[in-house]
Amino acid sequence: MPKVKIYTTPACPFCYLAKEYLKERGVDFEEIDVSKNEAAAKEMVEKSGQMGVPVIEIGGKIVIGFDKEKIDQLLNLK
C-alpha cells in the first residue's frame, strides 16, 4: 500500500469525508493540519499549487479535493 498523507483543516467538511473514506477502507494515513503548521501549508501549496484542502498525497501523486475515483485508482482499490 502506498504511503498516504492528507493535508487538512479542522473546519473542512470534505477533509472529514476523505478521512472517513480512507478509514472505512482500512487505509493508514498521516494527517497534517495546515491551519497549525505553516511549513506544511507551504509544502502542500508547492506540491499541489492549491491553497484549499483536502490535498491528498498517495505514493507521491497528488489528489486535489475528495475525489473517490482518483483515490481508489491510486490505492488500487477498484
Image (tube, helix red, strand yellow):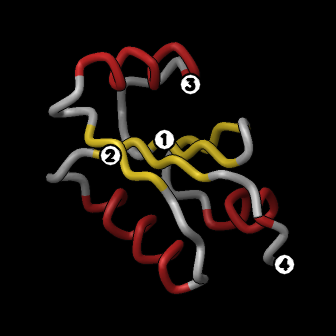
Asked if marks 1 and 4 touch (Cβ < 8 Å), the reply is no
Q: Counting residues from the N terminus, which is met first, the one under dot 3 or under dot 1?
A: 3
Vertical placement of residue 5 versus 19, above or below:
above
Q: Counting residues from the N terminus, which is met first, the one under dot 2 or under dot 4?
A: 2
Q: Which amino acid does label 1 sit on?
A: Val
Vertical placement of residue 56 versus 23, above or below:
above
Residue in the image at 60% along x and 42% along y: 57
Q: Badge 4 is on which residue?
A: 78
- Distance from the alpha carbon under mark 1 to that under mark 4: 21 Å
Pick the residue in front: 9 or 65.
9
Q: Which amino acid does label 3 sit on?
A: Ser
Label 4 element class: loop
- Distance from the alpha carbon under mark 2 to that under mark 3: 13 Å
Label 1 element class: strand
Residue in the image at 53% along x and 18% along y: 49
Quadrant in the rendering for residue 1 = bottom right
Asked if marks 2 and 1 touch (Cβ < 8 Å), the reply is no
Tell me where residue 9 appears, x and y as whole percent. 23, 45
Q: Badge 2 is on which residue?
A: 8
- Label 1: few (<14), some (14–19) or many (≥20) C-alpha neighbours in 10 Å: many
Q: Counting residues from the N terminus, which is met first, the one under dot 2 or under dot 3?
A: 2
Q: Counting residues from the N terminus, which is met first, the one under dot 4 or under dot 3?
A: 3
Q: Badge 1 is on which residue?
A: 55
- Label 3: few (<14), some (14–19) or many (≥20) C-alpha neighbours in 10 Å: some
Instruction: State left or right for residue 19 relative to residue 76.
Output: left
